[in-house]
Amino acid sequence: MSLRPSGLAFSVACRGGGGFVGRLCSTCTQVFGYQSIISVNNGGLLGEWKFIEKCPKGWFARGFSLKVDSGEGLLDDTALNGIQLHCTPSPTSNMSKTIESLSGKWGSWTKSRWCHSGFLRGFVLQVQPPQGYGDDTAANNIMFTCSNYEILLGLGGNRGNWGIQSNFCGTGICGIQTRQESPQGFLNDDTALNDVRFYCCHDDDTQK
């Protein structure tokens, strides 16, 4: 039996779960510190899921930065390499802590984008499909929705298509896990970040 919770299904099951389901949800929340995961269905498939990184308890992500390989002309491009979340204890606090899952080795960090009010709650990912003999870049850019429905577009690449909107965390995003392809060696095609999923913590629910 898989204990890997995913998005709305896990949230709905836990919301009304008594008996075994309730005990299982309580155990998962205590051990993993979240009740739901938000994800999208257009992420790249190369590489492996790396470690989970979470905001301090009670903090949520209010801003983000991207690590972007902006293009090397005729050389191998990797576009989006990493995502940093900037966590705060409240929607107006000046205190922040930056977290990230594993990032690729190429590119540089962009300026941070911040919600003017509230926290990051959902996202859309821009991903280039496989190019065959062409240069693959996989994930290129990300766009977040804030609590007040403000849209924050990342300063990433522009290749590929935008996917569908993820579910929304009830209060805000509090954790991140990236799917990264490891460096493929000289003259091989690298893609770096392929996919990402985010975590909703505590008694937070996911909403459509």
Image (tube, rainbow, N blue to C red):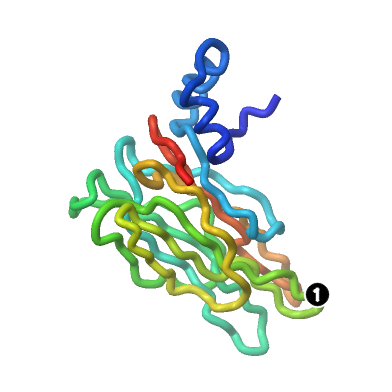
Q: Residue furthest top?
A: 19
Q: Position of residue 133 (x, y in %)?
A: 81, 78
Which residue is labeled 1 in the image?
A: 132
User: Up-down: is 36 above or below 156?
Assistant: above
Of helix, strand and loop, which one carries label 1? loop
User: Up-down: is 2 above or below 141?
Assistant: above
Q: Position of residue 69 (x, y in %)?
A: 53, 75
| Left or right: where 155 falls relative to 21 | left
Counting every numbered tag in the picture gives 1
User: Up-down: is 20 above or below 132?
Assistant: above
Number of other residues with Cα within 10 Å of mark 1, as a class: few under 14, some 14 to 19, many 20 or more: few
Tell which of 191 and 8 is nearer to you.
8
| Left or right: where 89 falls relative to 32 | left
Tell which of 13 and 44 is nearer to you.
13
Q: Position of residue 39 (x, y in %)?
A: 56, 50
Which residue is at 61% across, 33% downward?
4
Q: Position of residue 208 (x, y in %)?
A: 48, 46
Tell which of 97 and 113 is nearer to you.
113
| Left or right: where 141 falls relative to 188 | left
Which residue is at 67% across, 89% downward?
74
User: Up-down: is 106 above or below 169?
Assistant: below
In what quadrant of the picture does the N terminus appear? top right
Which residue is at 57% across, 35% downward?
9
**Three-letter code for the amino acid on which mark 1 is drawn:** Gly
Tell which of 44 and 147 is nearer to you.
147
Which residue is at 35% across, 71% downward?
111
